[in-house]
Amino acid sequence: MSTIMKPLHMARNFIRACVCNGEQVIDATAGNGYDTFFLAQQVGDGGKVFSFDVQEEALGRTRKLLEEKNLLHRVVLILDGHEHISYHVEKPVAAIMFNLGYLPGGDHSIITRPKTTVRALQAGLSMLKPQGIITLVVYTGHEGGEEEKRALISLCQRLDQKQFTVLHYSMVNQVNDPPSLIVVEKIH
Ligand SMILES: C[S@@+](CC[C@H](N)C(=O)[O-])C[C@H]1O[C@@H](n2cnc3c(N)ncnc32)[C@H](O)[C@@H]1O
């Protein structure tokens, strides 16, 4: 086992460090439900995970996983784009996870897009509690992925350092477009 963690594992470590029992959090891309399951474990019975996806298939898979794990009561499944998170969830939230791209084992033409992902990140920034975090696992191997990453980095670089700290974690010697991780923490 390697000491250097993969971006998704790193994202989960950040979330573990900042989410407490009873808090509300968002999974902005439910997909197969693994991140929703992870978040549901972190928030405990008093907390809530609001889980978004634009595909019924993804929410169906997420529901099934959470039912199997007996944690569906901690989750609200929402069939809508993450650019609309503020319509469905009251602030503040302790954490928001994005795992971008397409649904593995699903329709690869339904992917996250730069414009809506940037809108979702902007909305998410205004919903974070102090010391709350947003994690984004970003993929560049598919069409539009590089553009999405550039748009996100560009937005993050313009954030006021007195309000937000931003980290970009990436492998520099791996072939085949490895994913990278962006983490934004709200300072106060
Ligand atoms: C890489 S998958 C997510 C993996 C998931 N977090 C997991 O643990 O299995 C990306 C998901 O984003 C969804 N998606 C695409 N555009 C979206 C949008 N605007 N809002 C919310 N979800 C979106 C896709 O349908 C897909 O299921």
Image: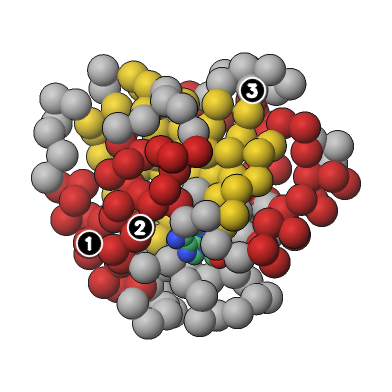
The answer to whether the beta carbon of the residue marked 2 is less than 8 Å from any atom of ligand 1 is yes
The answer to whether any part of residue 10 appears in the image is no
Which residue position is annotated with label 3? 47
Which residue position is annotated with label 1? 151
Q: What is the x, y in percent for residue 154?
A: 16, 56
Q: What is the x, y in percent for residue 91?
A: 42, 25
Q: Amino acid at mark 2?
A: Thr
Which residue position is annotated with label 2? 117
Badges 1 and 2: C-beta atoms under 8 Å apart? yes
**Does 141 appear above or below 34?**
below
Disc with the residue nearer the chain's start (1 vs 3): 3
Q: What is the x, y in percent for residue 10?
A: 49, 44
Q: Amino acid at mark 1?
A: Ala
Q: Nearer the viewer, residue 109 or 34?
A: 109
Q: Is residue 146 left or right of residue 44?
A: left
Callout in the foreground (1, 3)? 3
Q: What is the x, y in percent for residue 36?
A: 64, 44
Callout in the foreground (1, 2)? 2
